[in-house]
Image (cartoon, helix red, strand yellow):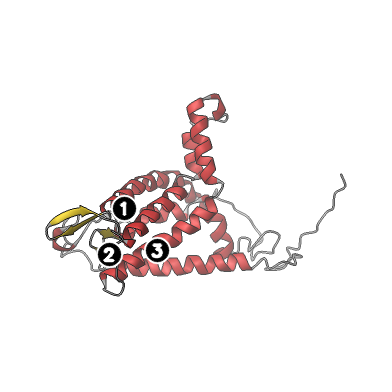
Amino acid sequence: MSQIDVPLSRAGFGQTQRTDNWWVQPLLVFLGFSAFIVYSTWAALQGQHFRFGPYLSPFYSPELFGPANEGWFGSNPTWMPVWVTGAMLILWAPGGFRFTCYYYRGAYYKAFWADPPSCTVGEPRKTYLGERSFPLILQNVHRYFMYLAVIFIFILGYDAWKAMWFTENGTSHFGIGIGTIVLTLNVILLASYTFGCHSLRHLVGGFLDEPSKVSVCAKSFACVSCLNHRHMMWAWFSLFWVGFTDVYVRLCAMGLWHDFRIF
């Protein structure tokens, strides 16, 4: 088979011989990440409008502090700074899981650091240190954040279950509202992203180079691999939906949206 050598232009930042719109994807990633970071930071600092009836925003789950001592630790202590909300004490865990995610690394390295901006495109540096030196060596804690992320899936699953029970006239009864569907889809999308994690594949594969030699490991590895094949899709869908879930609960709590009860 004949081969064609394609010269790579790396003389300067942004220089390339590519003729496609290579800059579109990193630009969209930059805008998407930036929008989520700005909104989630703002929402986490509010400390209010995170609960509506049986609906609890995933940014504030588990509910560490709540009105009328409803949180795990009652109301916010008077000595605690106003900006230290329940969300600020929680989001570091799922945030750390996403920030160190293998897919997200490749995405924001290109979009925010131009390292490189895209394949075969010149970058604004001449050396490559990789992830073996500080600070990027800290990315190796991803596997530990994964353990925490799995715990959050079960917590959010319980929130989705509680979103199916409405209290009226002092009596709790089963029901389905739009918010119930929103919270349920949220945990499904987050679970699809979390359980497709590369580190989880290694874990359920039994740390084996050949998991096929152990039946249980092989089946578990295949299941996680099925989700992993669409890891980028689950990453973006879950990122958008967890933000939308907070928006939905927040606007309902503020009286700006009406939660329709299906039954």
Identity, as a three-letter code, of the amino acid under mark 1: Ala
CA–CA distance between discs 3 and 2? 12 Å
Q: Write the residue at 50% across / 67% down.
A: 32
In the rendered structure, the answer to whether residue 10 lies left or right of residue 78 reads right
Q: Residue at label 3? A: 243
Instruction: Of the two numbered discs 3 and 2 on the same chain, state the one appearing first in sequence.
Output: 2
The residue lying furthest to the left in this view is: 170
Q: Residues within 10 Å of mark 1 (few under 14, many from 20)?
A: many
In the rendered structure, the answer to whether residue 130 lies left or right of residue 83 reads right
Q: Residue 35 in the image: x percent, y percent?
A: 46, 69
Q: Residue at label 2? A: 50
CA–CA distance between discs 1 and 2? 15 Å
Q: Residue at label 1? A: 160
Identity, as a three-letter code, of the amino acid under mark 3: Gly
The residue lying furthest to the right in this view is: 2
Q: Residue 41 in the image: x percent, y percent?
A: 37, 67
Quadrant placement of the N terminus: top right
